[in-house]
Image (spheres, rainbow, N blue to C red):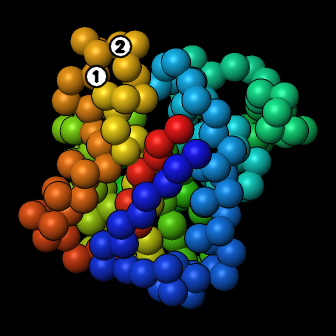
Amino acid sequence: MKLEFYYYNCSPEYINTIDPDLHAEIVAIINLLPKRQKQSEINADLFWLLTNKNWYYDTVPQGYSRKPQEEFQIQRSLQEIREWNDRSLCTTSSTLDTRWHADFAKTFDGLKLVQIEAQFGKVEAMFKDFFGFRIAYAERRLSLGIMIVLSDPMSYFAHRKSAIGGMASFHVAKDTLNVIGLDCPIWLVGVTP
């Protein structure tokens, strides 16, 4: 897996002040992702890999398999994951009635909230995710937002060219961040198989 990074209002050093292993943990998880034919399969893989590292989740992704891929060597069952999940950490706002949630969230030292959005869908959804980070940051709840996107959806899903028009991508996300001028720290991760 080839990864590219863009640090918006943050740096690897800042990320490591949240937790010394956070940067390496995210990179290691993403590096375990195998190439998949469908977006839903990528979401399911991320679900298993992140929850295995104690990241809380908003919803079980569509198309997930009831058991993780054997190559991940995950021993937890879906029932175990559901029992310890704290979905409230994924909430975008504690003051607005938006009903927005990040895909995954985790706190460090009980105070530093990090939320993850895995956006393998349309650009419009990516905008919503960025503003979700902004809202949580404005409420002084969010320390870091992590956005995971494909670097080049056209090459990743070359077999489905008609279905990928308008998908979020690393360069569109990076350019968008620089134009909309958010004040929150966002770590953008682009994924290429």
Horizontal side, residue 34 vs residue 155: left or right: right
Residue 164 is tagged as: 1
Of 133 and 150, the residue lying toward us = 150
Q: Amino acid at mark 2?
A: Arg
> Quadrant of the image for the N terminus?
top right
Q: Which residue is mark 2?
A: 160
Residue that appears at 63% across and 80% down: 19
Residue 28, how many percent across, how many down? 68, 57
Contact? badges 2 and 1 (CB < 8 Å) = yes
Marks 2/1: CA distance?
Answer: 7 Å
The quarter of the picture where residue 149 lies is: top left
Residue that appears at 85% across and 39% down: 74
Residue that appears at 46% across and 25% down: 39
Q: Amino acid at mark 1?
A: Ile
Horizontal side, residue 74 vs residue 156: left or right: right
How many numbered discs, if any?
2
